[in-house]
Image (cartoon, rainbow, N blue to C red):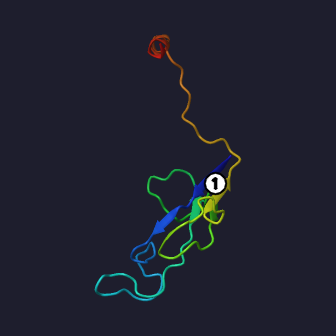
Amino acid sequence: GHFELQIVSMQNVNGQLQSGACCDGSRDSTDRRCTADECDTYFRVCLKEYQLKVSSAGPCSFGAASTPVLGGNTFSVRNAKSDDARIELPFSFAWPLPRPRSLSPSEQILDQKEAV
């Protein structure tokens, strides 16, 4: 199988990094927006096991991929099928599903009655 993510649009009103720092230049003292050139926006996906507290540190157990730079602070991908705005990560393991459980005879009867 594969995991696929299609980027449609992005809005970074203040033109800042995830850390809060400006991509380029300094911050305007009036509106707190970054003043220089826009960010060079790309996306990176890292698939890893479930984490109670999400962290970008550590290995990407199930794979990683990124896009090229797609735009500045705010943009829409014009062509929704754009290959540049799509990230695809193949995987060769069985996707985890909830463990199957057995139904008791009374639950089976209830299921059959509800289906009618």
In this picture, residue 93 sits left or right of residue 104: right
Residue 113 placement (x, y as % from top left): 45, 11
**Callout 1 crowding tier (Cα within 10 Å): few <14, some 14–19, many ≥20:** some
Q: Nearer the viewer, residue 67 or 60?
A: 67
Nearest to the observer: residue 17 or residue 69: 69
Residue 81, quarter of the rendered image: bottom right
Picture layout, residue 76 above or below residue 3: below
**Residue to which mark 1 is pinned:** 62
71 is higher (above) or lower (below) than 36:
above
Furthest toward the left, the residue is 30
Residue nearest the viewer, comparing 91 with 6: 6
The quadrant where residue 70 appears: bottom right
Rendered residue at 66%/56% (across/down): 89
Q: Where residue 79 sits: x, y (%)?
A: 60, 63
The residue at the point 61 percent across, 59 percent down is 60
Depicted 80 relative to depicted 29: above or below: above
Who's the residue at 58% across and 61% down the image? Answer: 45
Q: Secondary structure at mark 1?
A: loop
Spot occupied by residue 65 in the image (x, y as percentages of width and height) = 64, 63
Q: Would residue 37 be found to the left or right of residue 83 on screen?
A: left
Residue type at mark 1 is: Phe
**Residue under the image location 62 percent in, 67 percent down:** 67
* Residue 25: percent from left, percent from top: 44, 89
Q: What is the quadrant of residue 77 in the picture?
A: bottom right
Nearer to us in this view, 65 or 50: 65
